[in-house]
Amino acid sequence: MLNQEEIDLFMDVSNPLDCVEEVMAIHDWAFERLNEDELTVEVSGKFGHYTMNFLWQDGVSALQFSSQMDLTIHTSKIDDAKKAMSDINANLWLGHFDMDSSNRPSFRHTSLMRGMTEGSGAPYLEDMIQIALAECERYYMAFDLLSKTTSQGNNDLTLALMDVSGIA
């Protein structure tokens, strides 16, 4: 049975969006705090631009995070995109790729933040953001191929989904 001090520790979750703001400041990224529970930021990667959204659910102490790509999957490629996402997601340890109603791929992850404090939350959130950026960049070319209206061969998509070593 937990004592009151242990209960207080688990309930001591300040709004993690305050920590997200700290991470944004470290990277000098301009962000918009839409309200107390929602923050958005535009980030440029090597291959694409990403809209990151953070949504705090205080009732369950959960932070929902998504990094939406600047691509729209062509309607003729929806089935191929779903198959590619399924294959990609099977190998991810953290988060998953999803597609919204406007056919834009995004990397999503929800974290339970109970027990996190401002001091422990910032490094965790920094890691979460860096992992999302890395995964978006890693699979950007595959989703870029699927956003084209012209038919691509399966070989192109297979190559885009391969893990590579080094830089060409």
Image: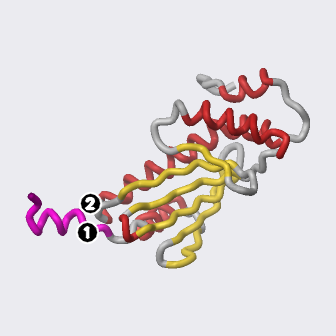
Q: Which mark is residue 12?
A: 1
Residue 121: x and y in percent read 35, 59
Q: In the image, is residue 113 above or below residue 154?
A: below
Residue ID at (51%, 35%) = 92
Q: Nearer the viewer, residue 29 or 80?
A: 80
In the shown orientation, is residue 150 left or right of residue 62? right
Q: Earlier in the sequence, mark 2 or mark 1?
A: 1
Residue 155: x and y in percent read 78, 21
Residue ID at (9%, 58%) = 1
Q: Residues within 10 Å of mark 2 (few under 14, many from 20)?
A: some
In the shown orientation, is residue 115 left or right of residue 64? left
Q: Residues within 10 Å of mark 1 (few under 14, many from 20)?
A: some
The range drawn in magenta is: 1-13
SS majority, magenta: helix
Tell me, what colour scheme is on the image?
Answer: secondary structure
Q: Disc 2 vs disc 1: Cβ atoms closer than 8 Å?
A: yes
Task: Place residue 112 in its image quadrant.
Answer: bottom left
Magenta residue check for 62: no
Amino acid marked by disc 2: Gly
Task: Place residue 120 in its image quadrant.
Answer: bottom left
Residue ID at (11%, 60%) = 2
**On-image quarter of the C terminus:** top right
Label 1 residue SS: loop
Amino acid marked by disc 1: Asp
Q: Which mark is residue 22?
A: none
Query: Which residue is tagged 2?
Result: 115
Label 2 residue SS: loop
Task: Place residue 154 in its image quadrant.
Answer: top right
